[in-house]
Amino acid sequence: MASQFSGVLQLTDLDDFITPSQECVKPVKVEKIKGKSVAKIQIEDDGSYVQISQDGEKQKLQKAKITLNDCLACSGCITSAESVLITQQSHEELFKVLKDNMLGGTEQKVVVVSVSPQSRASLAACYDLSSTEAGRRLTAFFKSLGVHHVIDTSFSRTFSLLESQREFVERFQRKEQESNVLPMMTSACPGWICYAEKTHGNFILPYISTTRSPQQVMGSLVKGYFAEQQGLSPQQIYHVAVMPCFDKKLEASRADFYMDKAETREVDCVITSGEVQKMLEEKNVSLNDIEPAPLDTMFSSVSEDEFLNHDGSGSGGYLHHVFTYAAKQLFGEEVKDLTYKVLRNKDFQEVTLERDGVVLLCFASTYGFRNIQNLVQKLKRGKSSYHFVEVMACPSGCLNGGGQLRPLPGQDPKELLQKVERLYKAERSLRPEDDCRVAELYRSWLHSVGEERAKQLLHTRYHTVEKMTNGLTMKW
């Protein structure tokens, strides 16, 4: 089975497991008994593991590295059915489709590649380019391979932000009538969604936003609106998403995003930033040597020479935009600058809106499974005061996703991450409410398909998944 996977489809460290199996990952203090001595293992604030001897001496433990093959030895993380779906998610599959097109195969496809801004920033950092310049060169590279259209998922993220804003305000207004509508938790991170479905099920799912991620909103746009505009059936389009995260492969494979009538997925293939780098290497080219090409503007609100960004975190800015929107809509407060309060660590931060000493809104950003598990336990004990939480499985969020480019030998990972963040935030920002092109599609396309269909295109559902384990699963 493992031989069918892309060479870069591996879990580079324990911060990027697809979903955390409670039988193999326990982020709590563990005691090991060796004869009469007792050694304790604890997690430091920076996420590192430290072994403490009986006399108090600390020894930092080396971080474990595992491959997907190692994971599949224990079905506590992903099922065999999911592993089969992932085999269809690699850059080799994209090459096959492009080759078939070139050879005049019977099933010619219009190939559309949508690129996330986090992946663009990661590649820009590697090749010492601006994020926009990297995007234009990526456009030229993909088109040289036979790709027809290259688009930016910042456009579809605008839809996700707008829908998240409206969903939160609607939930807040009915919080007195329903007990499990707040805190609303973001749904753009598939690692978090898989964990919630498989570990906490019906308890946690009602709190999670139903808004689709930017990847899957783009799936609706490409296989819906774009197909209609081009006079194509969804099956005639091969949609590839470039993402910073391996978990996005599983997200694209969800049954909820399969078009039954058209018998096709909304996103056919997901490749990571690292896989794009591997594609460049296999073609013996550097992004620096490629002449930039104009950007495709079919899903864009600006000219062919500019990418847009959204304010807030490098994981999409959900907290920022929902907070500012809710403050204005619910309390008439114009909030221009948000003040973040760091709590346990830099991956757990809080933002509040107060008036006359009364807290009106309390939002948080929670990154990494250590913080996520703390948050869930607070919810279970009824001790969470949050109205909204931006949740991401990876420490430091999407810019540090497991599918991003790794540091070079001797390169400081923190410095690389800071460079990626600077490049990501250097692009001009645009408020979701000010995006005229998105507003136009709301009026023309989404209004024309009807309210119920529009909701299906922009929202999704979650399902409790019964966890299955086998005899190889080790419990601590």
Image: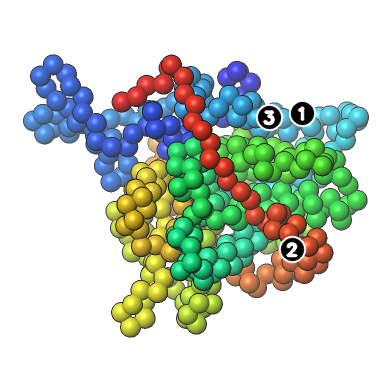
Residue 442 visible within the image? yes
Mark 2 lies on residue: 451
In percent of the image, x 11 and y 22: which residue is there? 37
User: Disc 3 residue type?
Assistant: Gln
> x, y percentage for residue 335?
47, 77
Tell whether 51 sits left or right of 431. left
User: Tags 3 and 2 in contact by the CB under 8 Å rule?
Assistant: no
User: Tags 3 and 1 in contact by the CB under 8 Å rule?
Assistant: no
The dot on residue 60 is: none
- Mark 2: few, some, or many residues within 10 Å (few <14, many ≥20)? few
Nearer to the camera, 213 or 245: 213
Q: Quadrant of residue 99?
A: top right
Mark 1 lies on residue: 96
The Cα–Cα distance between marks 3 and 2, rounded to whole angstroms, is: 33 Å
> x, y percentage for residue 365?
42, 57
Q: Earlier in the sequence, mark 1 or mark 2?
A: 1
> x, y percentage for residue 78?
53, 29
Outermost residue to the left: 55
User: Disc 2 residue type?
Assistant: Glu
User: Disc 1 residue type?
Assistant: Lys
> x, y percentage for residue 119?
58, 47
The Cα–Cα distance between marks 3 and 1, rounded to whole angstroms, is: 11 Å
Q: Is residue 80 above or below residue 271?
A: above
The dot on residue 88 is: 3
The Cα–Cα distance between marks 1 and 2, rounded to whole angstroms, is: 38 Å
Tell whether 313 sits left or right of 112. left
Q: Secondary structure at mark 3?
A: loop
Q: Secondary structure at mark 1?
A: helix
Q: Earlier in the sequence, mark 3 or mark 1?
A: 3
- Point out the frontmost of discs 1 and 2: 2
Q: Is residue 387 above or below residue 274?
A: below
